[in-house]
Image (cartoon, rainbow, N blue to C red):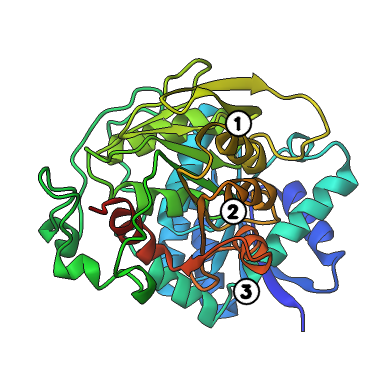
Amino acid sequence: MAYKVLVVDDSSFFRRRVTDILNNDPKLTVIDVAVNGIDAVEKAKTLKPDVITMDIEMPLLNGIEAVKQIMANSPTAILMFSSLTHQGAKATLDALDAGALDFLPKKFNEIAKTTEDAGALLRQRVLQIARKSGVGMRKLQSTLSSESRFSPQKHVSPLQPIKRPVTLTSALQKRTLLDSKTSSILSKEIIKEIPKQLKRSSGKKYKLLAIGTSTGGPVALQKILTQLPADFPLPIILVQHMPATFTHAFANRLNSLCKISVKEASDGDILKPGCAYLAPGGCQMILDGTESHAKLKVLEDTSTRIAFKPSVDVSFGSAAKIYKGSVLGIILTGMGSDGKEGARMLKNTGATIWAQDEESCVVYGMPQAVAKAGISELSLSINEITPSILKEIAHG
């Protein structure tokens, strides 16, 4: 049975184009279209589609507000269309905060070289999030509760990061992290989130936390990073598949929400504890130097040899050369298998690899690849990941 899709856009031309592309796949059928946000909210309620494609800029009710109302009344997997501008990046992040699962540039020539390739990519992305429809969508929404979503702040510009206090759950507020005399004391509330396999630290010494992700990654990363204390003892590298115009705004938004520092990586950055470095879109982020004085190389990549820019495989592989077994590597939600070979290289040096579990992923592609290959040691819910990181690195 085909997945039902509702196409929402105020442009009749774009509605027809998206409808034609999606109806080319027998597993998808466009059941109706909506011309604005109000229309979308009503049709989401009455038609109960499996997926909604949503424009951001529309009359009467914009896409972001429409997503908020749909997720409150009739949770549905939503793919946003956005412009590849700084303002488009901010709006897209707001839409993800509101509950959308994924996004694509509205100008198809920005996502593929040919019309056929662009259509194939759109169908693929819709099918991927469609698998979270129904019960799966409700479970995912419960896992990615409002506490895990972005909290957009009215005066934060995507170009000017401003540190603000992070609102945490009562459980997180009660915990004591990384005590100065002992390695760490975790409150009873946080210990409940740690899986049985990690009630005790392995005792390994770590020098780097490395995280790779794609579809669903912005919300997952925010959930993990906002729970880390300001004195987190490791540098962190983040590889998120994202357009070049988005990564700067995304890093700044994370920086405004987190206790640790978050920045878009620059060529020559020296890795420092308590700082997370986000790989810039359109580039490859490579670790260089020595374990005691590691730095970043950011290289523009116009080649066709590597599909993803940035690539988790590239960054993880370079981390294996510098830090060897002193890395805790985590593969989060995402389409495809980027990260599998980089994680394998880390694993071969003695590093620890974890993967996000299927139920809490938007797309169980990248984590499944490392799990099926026997590379990851644990599959963890997104809610378990930060407590498990803190437990694992805070050994005596």
**Residue 251 at what x, y percent from top left?**
43, 33
In the picture, the quarter occupied by the N terminus is bottom right
State the SS at label 1. loop
Q: Nearer the viewer, mark 3 or mark 2?
A: 2
Is residue 72 something that shows in the picture? no
Quadrant in which residue 370 is drawn: bottom right
Q: What residue type is labelled 3?
A: Asp
Cα distance, mark 2 to mark 1?
14 Å
Q: Is the Cβ of the residue at disc 3 closer than 8 Å to that at disc 2? A: no
Query: Foreground: 318 or 34?
Result: 318
Query: Foreground: 80 or 172?
Result: 172
How packed mark 1 is, by other alpha carbons closer than 10 Å (few <14, some 14-19, many 20 or more), is: many
- Mark 1 — residue? 281
Pointer 3 or 1: first along the chain = 3
Pointer 3 or 2: first along the chain = 3
What's the residue at 39%, 69% (across, down)? Answer: 143
- Mark 2 — residue? 215
Query: Foreground: 156 or 338?
Result: 338
Q: Which amino acid does label 2 sit on?
A: Thr
- Mark 3 — residue? 50
State the SS at label 3. loop
How packed mark 2 is, by other alpha carbons closer than 10 Å (few <14, some 14-19, many 20 or more), is: many
Cα distance, mark 3 to mark 1?
30 Å
Q: Is residue 309 above or below residue 8?
A: above
**Residue 148 at what x, y percent from top left?**
34, 57
